[in-house]
């Protein structure tokens, strides 16, 4: 079946540092890929998505590129802020998508001032 | 614009009790789903619905029932609560399935004693 593997945290960085959170996947066919973010006490919010190979999703300074050859969708940001502290989930939908998202276990990101 | 509304936000039950977690959306979304979030496990799909009158099982359906009598509502029922069902439950909706972004509620934190 489908699966998503992402680095587990917590990941602790200083403000203005460069961020990379690795995500790799296993899926049949050509999945759509997503990054969701969860702030404390809240539900998940879509951060960005990519639906085909070589697509780059971007939002709020975050970027991720759909790499089919390496089955990866790594999340990057050039300069993180304290407000970026949250849990980040990589996820995919494959096939018709009726059976929902397959999530990674989440990466807890802590940004220190 | 309320989005996806879940009630209650917190609940404590005794083993064997029953309860219903409510989920409502006001975006006229066809697709709705329930996930549970456990530490170190990410989110796992419990049940989903592609439209009113249609439901299906996800990855971890045992111990849960759902129904979809209207487009707006998708309640999740625990018939006889067990400690293993202690978790945070999230309801999500989207315009359709596939690569449509899913909108999440703020979650229900459920403890089974």
Image: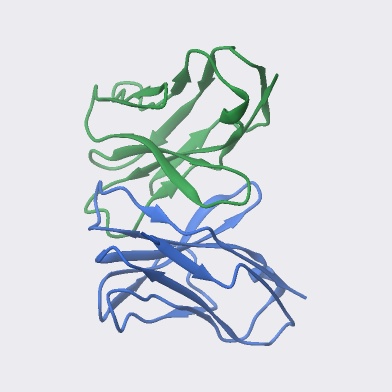
In the displayed structure image, the side of residue B38 where residue B44 appears, left or right: left
Determine the residue positioned at 24% across, 21% down: A54
Counting labels gives 0
Quadrant of the rendering where the C terminus of chain A is positioned: top right
Q: Position of residue B102 (x, y in %)?
A: 35, 52
Which residue is nearer to you in this view: B98 or B101?
Answer: B101
In the displayed structure image, the side of residue B16 where residue A31 appears, left or right: left
Q: Position of residue A40 (x, y in %)?
A: 63, 45
Extreme residue toward the right, this view: B113
* Chain coloured blue in this rendering: B
**Scheme by which the image is coloured:** by chain
Q: Is residue A58 above or below residue B32?
A: above
Q: Position of residue B68 (x, y in %)?
A: 33, 80
In the displayed structure image, the side of residue B82 where residue B98 appears, left or right: left
Determine the residue positioned at 33% across, 37% down: A33
Determine the residue positioned at 30% across, 84% down: B69
Q: Quadrant of residue A64?
A: top left
Q: Quadrant of residue B96?
A: bottom left
Which residue is nearer to you in this view: A103 or B69?
Answer: B69
Q: Quadrant of residue A71?
A: top left
Which residue is nearer to you in this view: B112 or B29?
Answer: B29
Q: Is residue B92 above or below residue B12?
A: above
In the displayed structure image, the side of residue A29 where residue A43 appears, left or right: right
Tint of chain A: green
Q: Position of residue A20 (x, y in %)?
A: 51, 19
């Amino acid at each position: 079946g489908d699966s998503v593997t992402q680095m587990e945290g917590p990941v602790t960085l200083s403000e203005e540092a460069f961020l990379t959170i690795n995500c790799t996947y296993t899926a049949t066919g050509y999945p759509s890929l997503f990054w969701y973010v969860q702030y404390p006490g809240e539900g998940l919010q879509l951060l960005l998505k990519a639906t085909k190979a070589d697509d780059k999703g971007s939002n709020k300074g975050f970027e991720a590129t759909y790499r089919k050859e390496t089955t990866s969708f790594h999340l990057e940001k050039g300069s993180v802020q304290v407000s970026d502290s949250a849990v980040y989930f990589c996820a995919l939908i494959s096939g018709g998508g009726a059976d929902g998202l397959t999530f990674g276990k989440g990466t807890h990101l802590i940004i220190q001032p | 614009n309320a989005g996806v509304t879940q009630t209650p936000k917190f609940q404590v039950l005794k083993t064997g009790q029953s309860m219903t977690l409510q989920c409502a959306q006001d975006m006229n979304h066809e697709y709705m789903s329930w996930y549970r979030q456990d530490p170190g496990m990410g989110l796992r799909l419990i049940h989903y619905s592609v439209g009113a009158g249609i439901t299906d099982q996800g990855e971890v359906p045992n111990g849960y029932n759902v129904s979809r009598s209207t487009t707006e509502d998708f309640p999740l029922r625990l018939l006889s609560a067990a400690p293993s069902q202690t978790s945070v439950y999230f309801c999500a909706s989207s315009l359709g399935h596939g690569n449509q972004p899913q909108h999440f509620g703020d979650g229900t934190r459920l403890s089974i004693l």
